Amino acid sequence: MEVAVFSDIHANYEAFKACFEYCSTHGIDHYLCLGDYVSDCPEPEKTMELVYILRDYFRSVFIRGNREDYLLDYRNRGEKGWHDGSASGSLLYTYEHLTDRDLYFFEKLPICCVWEEPGYPPITLCHGTPEQSNGLMFRGKANTRRILHNMKTQLLLHGHHHQQEAYRFRDRGCINPGSIGVPWDHGGKAQFLILKSDGGEWIEELKQLDYDREKEYHAFSESGLSARAPAWAALVMHVLRTGVDLTEAVMLRASQLCKEETGEAVWPDIPEKYWAQALLEHRIDLQGRSIG
């Protein structure tokens, strides 16, 4: 058996489509999907239609990610607090391009489950950690060792941070398939995982795949996302171009600049001029290209 594992698609439809086409042409019909299907990239509608194709025509399992939780929480809070701009404009754009069908789908997903296929070793699936969709698991950390020690299966798959890796703790394995949509490292190639087993232990094959990135960059401007969240869209495109994520550094710098000049920095009300200055200091233009 071969199983494809997809995580952190983030509405990057071109990357998602390329990974799916690769797997389907190799005869894979089992998919484990670990959350963060939308946000950051500009094509949530097309992304969700492909998600539903996986759900309806293949043997697929879906986990809810922290981005789905953000979108559901925004709805439940009365759709207040987000506005155009680099702090929350991308999330607002995503929310406005989703349907009730999409939100209902997210709402019914678990944040953790055990996938069992007769004749094969079971696998624990989550997005962040088994307890929290936004939890973090890194190799060698105390909470990672605790989670692996306490779980009932021999293998855990998770996403959330976009670092593709596989490691073991004693007799337990842990794999992050990397991000399809906003991938770290490997020059920005989309990342996913293929698991293989003949009934014994699962063998992992970490994959990196190039795709039509120029078409995805074009979608940022054509969709209007770049206009609604200029610096944020530039940072996402920079990751797609390079595999280097400077989002947190630019975000912190924008907040610092705002506080230095105004005396406070209240999220998400960070004026766009501070985002622009922080982006320039990190030598990134509005198309996500490195300057100089």
Image (cartoon, rainbow, N blue to C red):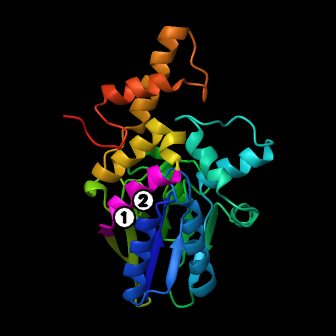
The residue indicated by pointer 1 is 191
In the displayed structure, does residue 131 sit left or right of residue 206?
right
At 42% from the left and 59% from the top, the residue drawn is 179
Q: Which mark is residue 179?
A: 2
Instruction: Measuring from the top left, give residue 258's x and y in whole percent.
Output: 50, 17
> Could you tell me which quadrant the N terminus lies in?
bottom left
Q: Nearer the viewer, residue 141 or 63?
A: 63
Residue 284 point in image, percent of width and height: 31, 36
Q: Are marks 2 and 1 in contact (CB under 8 Å)?
A: yes
Q: Crowding near pointer 2: few (<14 within 10 Å), some, many (20+)? A: many
First to last magenta residue range: 207-223
Q: How many marks?
A: 2
Residue 26 location, x and y as percent? Answer: 36, 87
Most foreground residue, 5 or 226: 226
Which SS type dominates the magenta stretch? helix
Magenta region includes residue 216: yes
Which three-letter amino acid code belongs to the residue tagged 1?
A: Gln
Q: Which quadrant of the structure image shows residue 115?
A: bottom right
On screen, 53 above or below 280? below
Could you say which quadrant of the image residue 171 lies in?
A: bottom left
Query: Which residue reaches farthest left?
Result: 292
Residue found 68% across the figure and 64% down from its top: 110
